Amino acid sequence: MLSFISFWRAAAIVLNDLGSSAYYVGGIAEQAVGRASSWFVLGVMLFSYAVRAVYVESCAMFTRGGVYRVVKEAMGGTLAKLSVSALMFDYILTGPISGVSAGQYVVGLGAETSTYFGYPLNPSPDVVNLWAAGIAALITIYFWWRNTRGIHESSDDALKIMYVTTVMVVLLIAWCGATILARPETQRLPPAPLVRNLVFNEDAVGWMPRLIPNGLRVMPAEGAPPPRYAFVPNAGALLGLIGILMAFGHSFLAMSGEESLAQVNRELEYPKHRNLMKAGMVIFIYSLLFTSLVSFFAYALIPDDVRPQYFNNLISGISLYLIGPLPLRLLFQGFIVIVGFLMLAGAINTSIIGSNGVLNRVSEDGVMTDWFRAPHRRYGTTYRMINLIVILQLVAVIGSRGNTYTLGEAYAFGVIWSFAFKGLAMLVLRFKDTSHREWKVPLNVRLGANEIPLGLSV
């Protein structure tokens, strides 16, 4: 018998994927663009509402199948294949970055606990990364086993995880707020999101030092590995705009998981569109508070010279600088790690399920041979596709050697291009398919019989 889910359950499923980025995006963004990164993470989370509006309009058109089907209908098969390549890049890296991040939190908790009980443990970053990679590989193999057998997590599982996560988030916000009130030295905000406050690492600037050698200057390390680059004073409006866009780009992975909204749409109960809008609002408010506040709390509570040590497990670092006895803070850190492990492990499972679904839709158009689509003799699953997905994820884990920053920067690339293709396709469909839609992205101007989609264009 068919069953449908409430908007609360739909929001929980998406937040299990989207919310997991709160565990790693703050550290990755600050490594890339410096101490002003918190504002850009906040900006990306505000922008996510506009991105979600594009997905909601797509769902209101009854265009099923996610990015691939939408782009194919609008712009043809070639661009659809490019778009699905970006989406697969996104999905394939969701698993490794989530698994490695979970490993970083587990190893960090183990080191802190061992030190507390009188056995100082301070492994080097390379050793921590290798342990994290090993944990990520084990989690990935476990979910390969589950998915090969067709054992999928239900919406009940996602809802229970979000109940526990909500308790953790409320405790975190309340405890951080109390700490900031009790310690005047923590009552500070990150540097304003202005060009003069942006300090990029070498990976973040890419080819820019060669393209504009007179536009950038080398900065002191300030606790981060050199070299660090900043735009020269009076760089001009164009270079300033480029710098701001670069900073946003390196914070964009905070918005991962949006495609999951389109996937859960078909399971929503009636009235479908109204419940989709409610789910979108819940997702927006929850992720805005959780993801952005983590970055602001980390800047306020953790000293600048210490914070780089916690870039890979930022929320654990926050817990150690709260007011209260150390045993209580360690217990809270353990709670944070357990919740994070559940969310991040769930994101690995979602990435395998999502990748498998995308490949199945693509294979229907003959992009992949029937050999890949052959069902498992016992379980009936498309196990060869699952094998391919998991092999690629394990290659990413091993190739990155457990480096969260490397995986995060690559992941942001897939997130940006996946949305770019989706947004462009929806814009084209506004002109190709003028039939009635239950809902549209706002800001549409009527000029006679024509409609100019200003909101969607922006």
Image: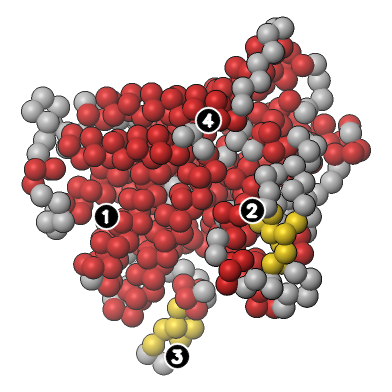
Mark 1 = which residue? 65
- Compare marks 2 and 1 and give the one earlier in the sequence: 1
Disc 3 element = strand
Q: Is residue 458 visible?
A: yes
Task: Give the distance between the C-alpha atoms of the residues marked 4 and 3, in whole angstroms.
Answer: 57 Å
Residue 10 in percent (x, y) is at: 42, 42
In this view, which residue lies farthest toward the right?
184
Q: Residue at x 89, y 32 (%)?
A: 182
| Image depth: mark 4 or mark 1 in front | 4
Mark 4 = which residue? 129
Which mark identifies residue 201? 2
Q: Say whether marks 1 and 3 touch (CB < 8 Å).
A: no
> Relative to 20, does residue 30 appear above or below in the rendering?
below
* Between 347 and 385, the one nearer to me in the picture: 385
Q: Is residue 261 visible?
A: no
Q: Residue at x 23, y 35 (%)?
A: 387
- Compare marks 2 and 4 and give the one earlier in the sequence: 4
**Quarter occupied by the N terminus:** top left
Amino acid under disc 2: Asn
- Compare marks 1 and 3 and give the one earlier in the sequence: 1
* Between 63 and 143, the one nearer to me in the picture: 143
Q: Residue at x 20, y 52 (%)?
A: 361
> Relative to 453, does residue 401 appear above or below in the rendering?
above
Mark 3 = which residue? 447
* Between 305 and 335, the one nearer to me in the picture: 305
Amino acid under disc 4: Asn
Amino acid under disc 3: Leu
Disc 1 element = loop
Disc 4 element = helix
Q: Please give left or right for residue 441 compared with residue 323 in the image.
A: left
Q: Residue at x 41, y 35 (%)?
A: 397
Amino acid under disc 1: Gly
